Image: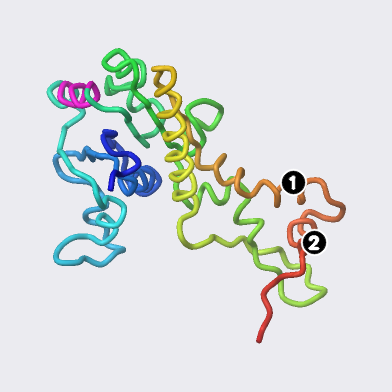
Amino acid sequence: MRSALQNIKIVDLTQHLAGPFCTMLLADMGAEVLKVEPPWGDASRSSIQYPTIEGRNSYFMFVNRNKKSIALDLKSEKGVEVLKKLVRISDVVVENFRPGVMDRLGIGYDALREVNPGIVYASISGFGQHGPYVRRQSFDIIAQAMSGWMWLNSREPRGMNSRASFQPSCLAGSPGDTIPGTFCALSILAALLHRGSTGQGQRIDVAQTDSLMTVSGLALTRTLYSDGTAEERAHRPPPHIHGVYEA
């Protein structure tokens, strides 16, 4: 059976989770994903937080399944030259370096668009490629905090009349990485459809914080425009007959 993204070639310059999760989804749909690693290997290959399976790190294997791999030193002229040759015959580039790093390496969007005018170039960062927080580093827990997720999912203080502060709660499953990764994959699919009808590539900018605020938009709207204190508005039961009950 023909895969949905068969014959689509993707150069994967991502690391950690948000970027690799995006390209993992595309690889699962049949895209040919070439993961570019530094000569010493991707950092997740040696993550001590996850068990190894037959000598291979389970974290690395999960997010990099169905991908091919190549080692390049992108700080060398030869490495950049090889990368540009790969981009010339590819459809998509995905990266999640801090904003500005790709430009300093000589492989930013403008440079790669000269090599391949139809390239779809996607970036994932904490706060986007522009704005006052552009230089700030971000991870899953930072995105959860900055987007309001930790507050919306905070634990209520004990006791009906307790004045203790609500305790922020970090959700498991790394939503600050997997949700923007999913949004980026969706954006890439739309860009490929657009290129198919226009011949034009796209520049995609996905921010972790924006992604989390998007999926929690109803909760944030309800919190901002309801009566009562901030804590009451955030934790008031929704107007639906459902909940978690002891049984």
The part of the chain drawn in magenta is 81-88
Q: Secondary structure at mark 2?
A: loop
The Cα atoms of the two marked residues, 1 and 2, are separated by 14 Å
Determine whether 209 is above or below 115 in the image: below
| Disc 1 residue type (three-letter) | Thr
Residue placed under numbered mark 1 in the picture? 221
Residue placed under numbered mark 2 in the picture? 239
| Residue 155 image point, x, y percent | 65, 67
Q: Residue at x 57, y 50 (%)?
A: 145
| Residue 68 image point, x, y percent | 19, 43
Name the mark nearer the viewer: 1 or 2.
2
Residue 193 falls left or right of residue 230: left
Q: Residue at x 86, y 55 (%)?
A: 228
Residue lying furthest bottom = 247
Q: Quadrant of residue 200?
A: top left
Determine whether 159 is above or below 173 in the image: below
Residue 231 falls left or right of residue 93: right
Q: Residue at x 20, y 40 (%)?
A: 37
Q: Nearer the viewer, residue 140 or 112?
A: 112
Tell me which label, 1 or 2, sits earlier in the chain: 1
The tally of labels here is: 2
| Disc 2 residue type (three-letter) | Pro
